[in-house]
Structures are given as structure tokens and as C-alpha cells.
Amino acid sequence: MEKGLISVDRWAEGSQAYFLTNLHTDHTQGLSSTWAMAPIFCSRVTAKLFPFKFPNFNLTLLRVLDLGSWHSLSLISPSTGSKVTVQVMAIDAYHCPGAVMFLFRGEFGCMLNTGDFRWEKNCERAKLAKEMLLNALKDDAVDVLYLDNTYCNPTFQFPPREVAVKQVADIISSYPDHDIVIGIDTLGKEDLLLHISNALNVKIWVWPERLQTMHLLGFHDIFTTDTSLTRVRAIPRYSFSINTLEGLNRMHPTIGIIPSGLPWVVKPFEGNGKLFDSLLTSGYNRSKVSSKGGKQNDKRNGDGLVEMPSATYINIAVLLKIGKSI
Ligand SMILES: [Zn+2]
């Protein structure tokens, strides 16, 4: 496709239409509340959540794309000045709420930009998205593919989301007297929190902005900002650290969970390499291997990764990472 027509998750000048696959921060770098360059196309759920991420944003610039429908755009070729028609369809990406892939069609052929997406063989939602894509393509093939290849490595074999959320709920229920803190982002991991709430019959504490997001997503009775109502708290991932856990454990035995596929960054303290032997998951063991393979350069490294000093913490904090599956 010619340059100067569209941009996906890229917010530099020079395009006529902009597309947002999901509201995670790594896709919105450069986008701000004062954006005025051109319309932004996104899913209905993303549009709904947009004002929380970007207060005072001029919402008339948002264009909602309903899943599975072709939408036609008339653009102008920067090189010839002639009219260019681009068709676009949004398809569920099965990532965080509102996340979509974009399929573009035009004189340039078919182009698929996956954004962050998740594929699970036996997942109904993923199967529906695949069908939607195949129906949209009919006899065409994808000519240009922009693929999010994070975790596209045999080292990463995450369990299905359903299995992973159950693992976390089991861990929590096996520590009935511990407080639990779960590090989450401003969006995503809702399935995990809902499962924990259902399985353990508990409410989940979230911070006030996250509560608003949960209400917008239609979850009204499960989440609370009252700490006295529950021992399970979902806290912002950026505020989650060993220091936080240490502080919490001085007051009450607390388990920390970071639901993420990001590999561990392990820095054994005083040469002691034994870490949390009793509760290591296969996910941990895999990522320990991968951390030697230079995975520390992962684009999202540093955002929430916790360095594990030593087994010193085993009695005061159990910190687990359980795949992107969540
Ligand atoms: Zn994402």
C-alpha cells in the first residue's frame, strides 16, 4: 500500500486515517488527548474505553468499526492525487477488551494487521474470529501480513487461558489465610479476575479508575474499592515490586501474582539460585531458559518485571508468573 494513506497503531504525522488495534500502552505511544490529525478507527469497546485513557479527547474523531463488516474509506493518493478506495474490516483479536485485527482490501491486494492477538485451537471465540477472517477473504489470500510475533517461539507453550485461570484460583484457594495481590494493567486479565471471583466467591479489590473501567465493561457487582471486603486485590502492575510485597508481608502474609507471559529476570541473591521451588510452574522453568537467550531485550521488558532476589522470600511471598494464557 502506498505511504501516506493509513497508519495502524502508529501516531506520527502523514496519514489520512489512523487505526487503533487495542488500548494497551505499547500501541498508543504518541497518541494523546490533544490528537487532532485525522479520524481514528477502532472497535466499539475501544471507543467506549477511550475517554478513560485520554480524558478530554475530541470523541468526534473516533470512528467505530463493528466486527465482521466491511467499511469503505475514500482517501487521496499522495503521489497521483487520485481517489483511492480502501476497505477495512475489524476482527476480534481475543486479546484485551476491544482488541481487534484489521483486514484491509484495495488495489494493493489484501493486508492483515493482527495487532496483539491470541490463538487457541479449541477456543470458540478464536474459532469464530478465524471463520470471520476466512469468510472475509473468500478466495483471496493475504498478500501482506503484519504479525505480532511476541511469544512466537517454541519456548513459549502457554496453557489455554481457561487452564491458567484455574491454576491461579487453585493457588489462591490453597492459601486461605493469605492476602493476595495481583499485578494487572489498566486493561486486560478480566477473565482471570472473574474466574477467581466466581471460584472463590470473593469480591476483587481494584483501584478507582479500574473500577470505572470494569463498570464500563459491564461488570458491576464483582469489583470493589473497599479493602475491608476482600483479601484479593488487583493492583497496578507498575506499582508491584518486591519492596511492595515485603512491606505487605510485614503486616500480613501476602502472595503476589503477576499474570504475564513475560519471562522472569532472575538475579539470584548471594549466588543462591533456589527460587520458590515449591510453587514453580512450567512457565517459570521455560522462561528461566529463555532469559538466557537474550529475551531480556523484549520490547516490554522493564514494565512490571520483578527481579527475584532469592529464596529468602519463600515464607513471606510467593510470586508466580503464569503465561500469557491469562
Ligand atoms: Zn496488548
Image (cartoon, grey):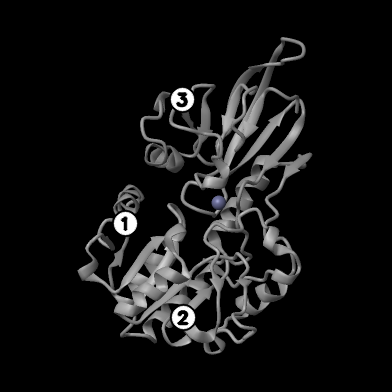
In this view, 185 is above or below 170: above
- Amino acid carrying label 2: it is Val
Query: Which of the 4 image quadrants contains residue 324?
Result: bottom right
Cα separation between marks 3 and 1: 29 Å
Q: Which residue is mark 2?
A: 318
In this view, 308 is above or below 134: below
Q: Which residue is mark 1?
A: 207
- Pointers 3 and 2 in contact (C-beta within 8 Å): no
Q: Which residue is mark 3?
A: 61
SS at badge 1: loop
- Amino acid carrying label 1: it is Trp
Left or right relative to 217: residue 279: right
Nearer the N terminus, badge 2 or badge 1? 1
SS at badge 3: helix
Residue sitting at x 74%, y 71%? 292
Neighbours of disc 2 within 10 Å: few (<14), some (14-19), many (20+):
many
In this view, 302 is above or below 278: above
Which percent across, then down, holds residue 229?
21, 70
Of all residues, the one furthest to the front in this rendering is 270
Cα separation between marks 2 and 1: 22 Å
SS at badge 2: loop
Nearer the N terminus, badge 3 or badge 2? 3
Residue sitting at x 32%, y 60%? 206
Of all residues, the one furthest to the top in this rendering is 81
- Front position in the image: 216 or 67: 216
Left or right relative to 26: residue 245: left
Query: Which of the 4 image quadrants contains residue 240?
Result: bottom left
Which percent across, then down, holds residue 193?
39, 66
Residue sitting at x 68%, y 69%? 156
Query: Which of the 4 image quadrants contains residue 50?
Result: top left
